[in-house]
Amino acid sequence: MLKPAESSVALSPLIANRWSPRSFDAVAEISDTDIAAILEAGRWSPSTSNQQPWRFIVAKRGDSHFENLTKNFAGFNATWAPSASALILVVAVTTNEDGSVRPFALYDAGLASAFMTMEANHRGIAVHPIAGFNRDEVKAEFSLPDNYSQTAILVMGKQAPAEHLDNEVLLEREKAPRVRLPLAEIVIAGLPAA
Ligand SMILES: Cc1cc2nc3c(=O)[nH]c(=O)nc-3n(C[C@H](O)[C@H](O)[C@H](O)COP(=O)(O)O)c2cc1C
């Protein structure tokens, strides 16, 4: 199902057609080549002083990492997200070696997530980021240090028809139009005339 962005000016198809579906094919698999390409996209995103503060936990359906992440999904994420083929938890290292804070680590990790999302979409792989999971459990499971801030899990796989969702609320959300605030509301200064 396509839900292209309605924009005042035409966007690149990759940007316009990206959206976050919840209906995934529960048997489709992602190749290691695709996973590697997605990780490379994150690796090659920009970061503050080239600090590259992102760290990734990669899980494929059927492996122990996938089990360890999916069992910690919160709320309704636990109902749909386990059907995905792979998960990438994006973590930000929030301090330097001397203990000083990296103020833009989360920004950098978000950029890497965006790059990975676009590379995945380019390869025909749908992505849905989720922040709803139990961070304390995941921290313990993967022995993450205190300065590793868990951002979101990129839930990815082959998009399935909306009707494959057996939950009425989720089905409604899957079919709902995508909405955004108007440019006039989010541009503080310098709104273009176009
Ligand atoms: C950091 C972050 C956390 C999110 N967490 C969840 C989540 O826990 N569960 C969920 O269903 N969607 C989650 N989303 C998806 C957003 O709801 C979605 O991106 C937003 O509604 C815009 O829709 P679109 O991505 O289809 O354009 C999250 C998105 C981001 C960027």
Image (spheres, grey):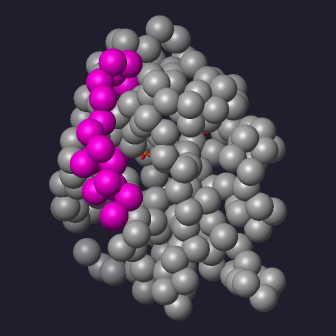
Magenta-colored span? 19-41
Q: Is residue 29 above or below residue 126?
A: above
Q: Is the C terminus in the top left, top right, bottom left or bottom right quadrant?
A: bottom left
Q: Is residue 179 above or below residue 108?
A: above
Residue 163 horizontal/vertical position (percent): 35, 12
How many marks do you count on the picture?
A: 0
Q: Nearer the viewer, residue 19 or 57?
A: 57
**Do we see residue 26 in this rendering?**
yes
Left or right of 117: which side holds 145? Answer: right
**Do we see residue 18 in this rendering?**
no
Q: Is residue 35 above or below residue 132?
A: below
Q: Residue at x 37, y 25 (%)?
A: 24
Q: Nearer the viewer, residue 10 or 189?
A: 10
Q: Residue at x 73, y 84 (%)?
A: 97
Task: Please say whether residue 20 is one of the residues in the magenta stretch.
Answer: yes
Q: Is the N terminus in the top left, top right, bottom left or bottom right quadrant?
A: top left
Residue 172 horizontal/vertical position (percent): 46, 20
Left or right of 163: which side holds 9? Answer: left
Task: Please say whether residue 139 is one of the residues in the magenta stretch.
Answer: no
Residue 37 horizontal/vertical position (percent): 28, 56
Q: Residue at x 49, y 86 (%)?
A: 50
Left or right of 49: which side holds 76? Answer: right
Residue 104 horizontal/vertical position (percent): 63, 79
Left or right of 115: which side holds 53? Answer: right
Q: Nearer the viewer, residue 11 or 114?
A: 114
Name, please, the residue furthest toward the top: 166
In which quarter of the view is residue 95 placed?
A: bottom right
Q: Residue at x 39, y 73 (%)?
A: 45
Q: Nearer the viewer, residue 127 or 173?
A: 127
